[in-house]
Image (cartoon, coloured by chain):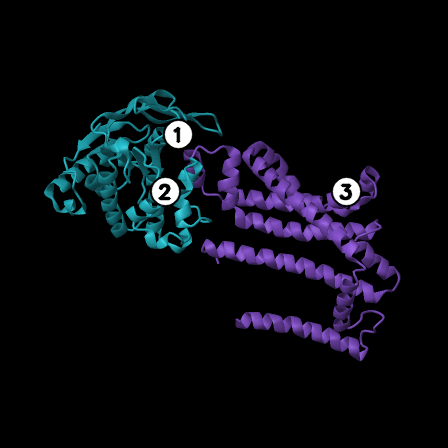
Amino acid sequence: MTNASHNDVHKDDLHVSLRGATKVFRRADDGSEVHALGPVDLDLKRGEFFAVVGPSGCGKSTLLEVLAGLSTVTAGTVTFEGKPISGEVPDGVGVVFQEDACFPWMTVADNIAFGLRQAGAAEGEIRARVEGALALMGLNAFAASYPAQLSGGMRQRVCIARTLVLQPRLILLDEPFGALDQQTRLLMGEELLRLWRETGATIFLITHALDEAAMLADRIGVMSARPGRLLEIVETGWPETRDSTIVEKPEFGHVTARLWQWLRAESMKSVGRMDRP
Amino acid sequence: MRLVVVLRLLVIAGLIGLVEMLCRMGVIDNFTMPPPSRIGADLWRLLASGKFNGAIGKTLSNAALAFFLAVSIGMLAGVVIHRIASIRAALDPFFATYYAVPVLAFYPLLIILFGLGDAPKIIIAFMLGVVAVIVNTLNGLDRVPKVLLKTARMARMGWFETANKITLPSAAPFVLTGVKFAVAYALIGIIGSEFILSTEGVGFEIAFAYNNFDNATMYPLILLVMTVSITVNMLLGMWEKRLLQRRGLR
């Protein structure tokens, strides 16, 4: 997984920028307006690992869809590498969803090759890059298997490999480990850190697990209950070579505690309790 | 071989054996029905003589054409109807009551419109099958996980490409159920029409043999129709089984 553009030392450049990004939905049934998101101001540096936590239904996924070009903002601007994102999926952006997005009718190798085939890459190049992605995700032995033969964690690896093989410069992850058990989550988290270091991509991770965010990210954005705004950005200050053993450190406890401090009141709002501490 | 398969074959063999015995003992007289062994031998003789090659070719090619039209137009219509919610809502009750209408009753009307050629028969068989394909395609498309659609959008696929490469493959087990119906309906539609008003085809030959008390022709042709239909359905069943196994569903 080498990509020239990753290694051009543009690190710390402004990579993603949101200014007053706002999303208002109109309900299909009664036409009433729902203010789902924003206004959000946020800058991501190239190569940064940014996580977002927030109460359920706060618009985290809306924010991700906006960045992916799957959804458009109703006010404000969103730019990726200096170009505005407006309802069209930008080049160089990859997404991993929470749900199993494997195609059950294709082998693991064909699943991973899907995006490259769509882009019209040459068969030889596809084979080489798929092999690279299989190796990277430890899936070599399963190239000819069908997704149904794999565990949930392995299927999510396939989905990650399918995204990585396209060598995205910005990887958006929407609760990618949400459906996995705790041990698998921790290991997948470590794996994600490794991939982040190896690819140099900017990562935008949405999660509901505070410890996951605290363990993985450089910075963590805390979102409010709907309409989702960024309440606070917590810097973790971890070294780039971190792994899951970071959870032993007292600083890890501090970060998690700070996130919870911000989130507690918001989570109560979203479950309908208005009493504040 | 698994025990279930052995039992299944025993049931079939037992039933055929029972009929064979009843025929040979004269409980069923030969004028009503010859013994199954004779029917089989007669079929072999008929096929070897080539006497009915034209009729068989006609029936099978018409059925194949009706099947192909029902499946391709049915799948395309399913995709289009699924995309447009208002059309879907408007048509749903028609689909639900469609099979209450005996389509074969329209055969005389279709002959008036299209003449005594192949067209009315193919239209009947098509009409019988197409709605089963549409309904099952819709059913399958309803069950396509949303995340696959998002994946298609990430790959910048248009609606046709999404249907072709994502939603229809995802819905394949359901679509295949419709396809199996279409096989059966294609044969029913073509042979049924040949029975009513036609001068060619296996259905016509069966009716002709019936009117001439020609059991040595009628029963073998019935056996032929059954064999073709069951064979095609079994092949599709095997395909379906492989498809489901691959998805861990069977």
Q: Nearer the viewer, mark 1 or mark 2?
A: 2
- x and y, in percent, of residue A118 in the image: 44, 37
- The residue at 83%/49% (across/down) is B198
Q: Where does label 3 land, which residue?
A: B119
Left or right of A270, for residue B90: right
Q: Secondary structure at mark 1?
A: loop
| Residue at the bottom extreme of this rendering | B25
Q: Chain of mark 2?
A: A
Q: Which chain is cyan?
A: A
Left or right of A239, for residue B74: right
Q: CA distance from mark 1 to mark 3?
A: 48 Å
Tally of numbered tags: 3
Amino acid type shown at disc 3: Ala
Amino acid type shown at disc 2: Arg
Q: Is residue B177 visible?
A: yes
Q: Nearer the viewer, residue B215 or A124?
A: A124
Q: Where does label 1 land, which residue?
A: A89
Q: Earlier in the sequence, mark 1 or mark 2?
A: 1
- Chain B colour in the picture: purple
Q: Where does label 2 land, which residue?
A: A162
The crowding category of the residue bearing disc 1, from other C-alpha atoms within 10 Å (few below 14, some 14 to 19, many at least 20), is many
Q: Secondary structure at mark 2?
A: helix
Residue A37 vs B37, above or below: the answer is above
Q: Nearer the viewer, residue A25 or B130?
A: B130
| Residue at the left extreme of this rendering | A250
Q: Is residue B249 visible?
A: no
* Quarter of the rendering containing residue B68: top right
* Quarter of the rendering containing residue A159: top left
Amino acid type shown at disc 1: Val
| Residue at the front extreme of this rendering | A124
Q: CA distance from mark 1 to mark 2?
A: 16 Å
